[in-house]
Image (cartoon, rainbow, N blue to C red):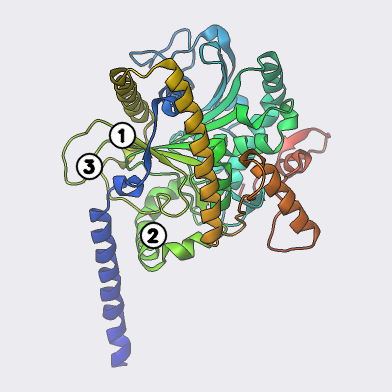
Amino acid sequence: MSVLCGLPPLLECVYCVACARWAWKRCLHSAGHDSETWSVATAEEFEPVPRLCRYILAVYEHDLRQPQWEPPEGYGINPDCLIVKKNYPDTGGRAPPYLLYVDHDHADIVLAIRGLNLAKESDYAVLLDNRLGKRKFDGGYVHNGLLKAAGLVLNAECEILKQLLEKHPNYTLTITGHSLGSGVAALLTMVVAQNRDKLGNIDRKRLRCFAIAPARCMSLNLAVRYADVINSVVLQASFTCITFNILNHSRWILLALPCLLCLRCMRDTCISEEKMLKDPRRLYAPGRLYHIVERKPFRCGRFPPVVRTAVPVDGRFEHIVLSCNATSDHAIIWIEREARRALELMQERDRVMEIPAKQKMERQQTLTREHNEEHKAALERAVTLAVPHAFSPSDYGTFDEVEEELSDKSVRDSSTGSSTKCKTKDNWDELIEHLYEKDESGHVILKRSRSQ
């Protein structure tokens, strides 16, 4: 009996020691430590980010001809080139609002998706429509609710996008989003990359995605594999969207938050990163990462922002950082401001160096080659770390053939009855069948989640 009486205080002491160790590690760990070994980004590759942030901000406006919250430098949007702009009534609350814009100045077709609306319960329904291992896609796992939203957007705008791409064959297709919208944009890019024939066989090189303050929406093997088309932008210690399957309604978030933080504290202390890497259901921020660092540990104020980039496999922003700026670092307004400052510093440095136009072109070609090599190295490291469903690129052929090779390899594995490999080529009809159903009158409607 005395042993049982002494057990609760002992467990309490162990818990307090674990929490103290976790807090000590988090206080010494700053967001800049995660990217301190990454290379510095160039102005050419980072140039679209501030502009795309302004396009996302434009989604919040009801009328772009009479904007109410326009930033001092403007949105940079010509209302006459705005093709589509949909709000919550248009999407039925099953996807965030978005706009489709043709940017003739930059030869770009942009699909911009806004972030989480804290006042909209439908956004929480999309965010919470998931549990570990609920939805497989292309040999990995993705966020179920965000994939549904991505399928809804693509199904609605597929024909318009196809017409625009055929009308402007030299334009790129850029899909971008913030917070909740970043997850929709990333998964939408994956679906398009797997079904390019639906958009007139668009070249993969014409497709790109910029996920601003990215949501954790895909497993690690997919996050690394799609790093050639998906880019994520993180400001300092910005938090990413975290979904908890024990939450069934948005009003319980505030009540359950202290308990969830305690549980996360214990898990982060006791589970090693190697074990987390081998969990195929764990979701990560997608693609190549761009980290904007503007604060230093034990320093006050903001410093001139520096942008670092890499395609990491381990050390992919898995540490919880205790920061009073986590919320502001996640805001699209602050990200746009700091990204613009960082780009201006890069361009000013290039002007001081007086780089000739020919050398800039050569540097762009070198940058593309380096990114391809870095992507290939990340795929190989994922195999070395035994990341589930990760494939190593072939030693033969060009790196542009890697995606086709991975697809063929996975199909061969699935045809031989292997239970550990998933089919990487998700058919468009199968995806639509998963997302939609027919009602009694024969009309096609979006499936409702079981929780609803």
Tags 1 and 2 in contact by the CB under 8 Å rule? Answer: no
Q: Reply above or below: 173 against 430.
A: above
- Separation (CA) of disc 3 from disc 2: 25 Å
Q: Earlier in the sequence, mark 1 or mark 3?
A: 3
Choose the circle earlier in sequence order: 1 or 2.
2
Q: Position of residue 213 (x, y in %)?
A: 42, 37
Marking on residue 264 = 2
Neighbour class for label 3 at 10 Å: few (<14), some, many (≥20)? some
Asked whether, in this view, residue 124 is left or right of residue 393, the answer is left
Which of pointers 3 and 2 lies earlier in the amino acid sequence? 2
Q: Amino acid at mark 2?
A: Arg
Q: Position of residue 358 (x, y in %)?
A: 45, 18
Q: Tell me, yes or no, whether the two marked residues, 3 and 2, touch with CB atoms within 8 Å.
A: no
SS category of the residue bearing label 1: strand
- Quadrant in which the N terminus is drawn: bottom left
Identity, as a three-letter code, of the amino acid under mark 1: Val
Can residue 412 be seen here? The reply is yes
Of badges 3 and 2, the one in the foreground is 3
Residue at horizontal 25%, vertical 43%? 324
The residues tagged by marks 1 and 2 sit, at their Cα atoms, a distance apart of 30 Å
Is residue 419 left or right of 232 when viewed as pictured?
right
Q: Residue furthest bottom?
A: 1
Disc 2 packing (10 Å; few <14; some 14–19; many ≥20): few
Q: Residue under label 1, please give it.
A: 306
Whether 360 is drawn above or below 371: the answer is above
Helix, strand or loop at label 2? It is helix
Q: Quadrant of residue 24?
A: bottom left
Question: To which residue does mark 3 refer?
Answer: 296
Query: What x and y, as percent, mark residue 247?
Result: 49, 53
Mark 1 or 2, closer to the camera: 1
Badge 1 crowding class, 10 Å Cα cut-off, few under 14, some 14 to 19, many 20 or more, is many
Q: Is any atom of residue 86 visible in this view? A: no
